[in-house]
Amino acid sequence: MRERLTNSDIVELTEFRRALHRVPEISGEERETAKRVAAFIAPTKPDLLVTDLGGHGLAAVYDSGADGPTVMLRSELDALPIEEISNNPWRSQVPGKAHLCGHEGHTTILAACARQLGRERPKRGRVVLMFQPAEENGAGAAAVIADPKFASLAPDWAFSLHNFPGLPLGHAGLSAGPTNCASRGMRIVLTGRTAHASMPETGISPMAAVASLMPALTALAHDAKGERLGDDFALVTITHASMGGHAFGIAPGRAEIWATLRTLRDDRMAALVERAEALARDAASAGNLGLAIDYHDVFHHCDNAPEAVAIFRAAFDAEGVPHGEAKPLRASEDFGLFGRGAKSAMFWLGAGEDIPQLHNPDYDFPDVLIEPGTRVFMRVVRGMLG
């Protein structure tokens, strides 16, 4: 390929990644992160820079001026509400928040693509570098797409990557079809009436409902033990439960159960939601309890289009990146909605086999992935647009 990152580029990009790592911002709070990215790529002179997209999102457009498809490369801006445990000089300086998923690394890869696109525009069509907000809570892609400013950016093709601990360093994993599960957080609130602990019969306690409902919800799991997820895969995980207050003299009158529902595809999720809600209604009715249900962190499933997968595989081969098939993951990813209006694919880029996992308090994105991640994306761009 005609261009490569220079040694000077790699040094500056590495420092940029570490600078982002020091000042993480969680979903919905990425204002300063977006400003730092915009300032870093400003010397590349994008033809259009769209700010405050779907919240604090940022899109940089590099336009050939000639007819051709719109190719979008996407990264994420947000960090996690987790305390980092690290001795790295670039560790998080913000208590309780850290880049423990590698999003700052993905963003740096897109910034590297900006440098190369600034040096040479595509021959046809245009490239949109999408720095997406709020990936971790599943709200960002929907907000970006709903933003009126997105209409002029809507891609024909959308590509993304995610670093992946457990896969050999620099190796790629990719398959057509489902890649990440649909999921959503279900909050169940059961309301009765408090009573004196010496006379619990005078109140309405949610205890029996909670005790029966938690195992009933987890029993909705189906096809969840196999190594490869099937179309009927379903999983319900209880993530939080609370009842009453911190007092020995009061029988409880309110309880909450939080559960995460997962399915391989969006259409299977509707059936799982219906069954979970029916269990909650039955438990509330049996206990003469009020019931409220709401949903949070809603993720749609991700599906790799065969045509986009073929483009990635050709890029891997051209760049000498080892690659193989990847199984669908139980974990969710807020990239799936972009695939509803474009042919899209995401691949996994190995971060190493014997390292902490994503979201672990000691995880850190390997800087050595900046260069191969950039090479793959730019091979895709040059192969499609010249």
Image: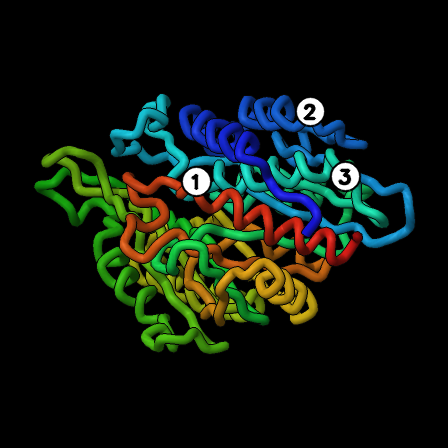
Q: Check whether the beta carbons of the residues at disc 2 and disc 3 lie within 8 A of each other.
A: no
Q: Which amino acid does label 1 sit on?
A: Asp
Q: Check whether the beta carbons of the residues at disc 3 and disc 1 lie within 8 A of each other.
A: no
Element marked by disc 3: loop
Upstream in sequence: badge 2 or badge 1: 2
In the picture of the structure, the residue carrying the numbered disc 1 is: 367
- Say which of 285 and 79 sits in front: 79
Camera-nearest label, 3 or 1: 3
Q: Which amino acid does label 2 sit on?
A: Ala
Q: Residue at x 40, y 43 (%)?
A: 366
Q: Which residue is drawn at 30% across and 61% down?
A: 213
Q: What residue type is labelled 3?
A: Glu
Mark number displayed over residue 222: none
In the picture of the structure, the residue carrying the numbered disc 2 is: 42
Q: Where is residue 127 in the image (x, y as percent from the top left)?
A: 75, 45
Mark number displayed over residue 120: 3
- Say which of 309 and 291 sits in front: 309
Q: How far apart are marks 2 and 1 (CA)?
A: 22 Å
Drawn side of residue 324 relative to residue 336, left or right: left
Q: Where is residue 26 in the image (x, y as percent from the top left)?
A: 46, 32
Element marked by disc 2: helix
Q: Position of residue 144 (x, y in %)?
A: 67, 41
Q: Which residue is drawn at 34% across and 52% down?
A: 289
Camera-nearest label, 2 or 1: 1
Camera-nearest label, 2 or 3: 3
Q: Distance between the residues labelled 2 and 3?
A: 15 Å
